Amino acid sequence: QVQPVESGGGLVQAGGSLRLSCAASGRTFSGYDMGWFRQAPGMDRVFIASIIWNTGVTYYADSVKGRFTISRDNSEATVYLQMNFLKPEDTAVYYCAAGRNSRYPYWGQGTQVTVSS
């Protein structure tokens, strides 16, 4: 069983950048698809980006396409979400999750991202 642990959130001005990290606790992410999700206050948790474990193919929500990039390191122990050109509407708690076939049973505790206007 893998336990994702997020870090890297914080406060940034609109137009700025942040990089979120998701480290594997207990084992590597090898064999798992990895996803990033976010939940804004009063809203449902929504999909942001994912990377498929065996192909490296990435998927993005339309709202972040062209601004966010998901990647993983070669050791498969850390997954990143590079966020550029941040907007106030990107403010949310960001979660990392591990799973397969679009099912994500393993979730991190989340990291807060706040974008000021």
Image: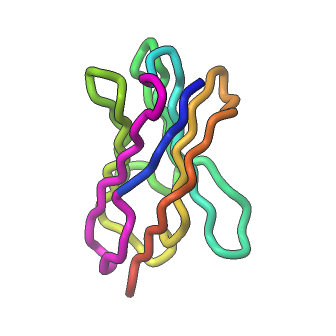
* Nearer the observer, 61 or 40: 40
Direction bottom: furthest residue: 117
Which residue is depicted at the point 36% across and 47% down?
Answer: 21
Q: Quadrant of the N terminus?
A: top right
Up-down relation of residue 88 to residue 23 (above or below): below
Residue 32 percent across, percent down from the top left: 53, 21
Up-down relation of residue 112 to residue 67 (above or below): below
Which residue is depicted at the point 41% across and 43% down?
Answer: 22
Q: Would residue 55 be counted in the magenta stretch?
A: no
Residue 103 percent across, percent down from the top left: 70, 29
Direction front: furthest residue: 26
- Residue 37 relative to residue 72: left or right: right
Q: Quadrant of residue 76?
A: top left
* Nearer the observer, 54 or 32: 32
Q: Would residue 14 be counted in the magenta stretch?
A: yes
**Which residues are drawn in magenta?**
8-28
Q: Quadrant of the C terminus?
A: bottom left
- Residue 3 relative to residue 78: left or right: right
Which residue is depicted at the point 49% across and 72% down?
Answer: 91
Residue 6 percent across, percent down from the top left: 44, 50
Up-down relation of residue 117 to residue 46 (above or below): below
Up-down relation of residue 38 to residue 81 (above or below): below
Which residue is depicted at the point 71% across and 68% down?
Answer: 43
Residue 56 percent across, percent down from the top left: 39, 21
Q: How is the image coloured?
A: rainbow
* Nearer the observer, 27 or 96: 27
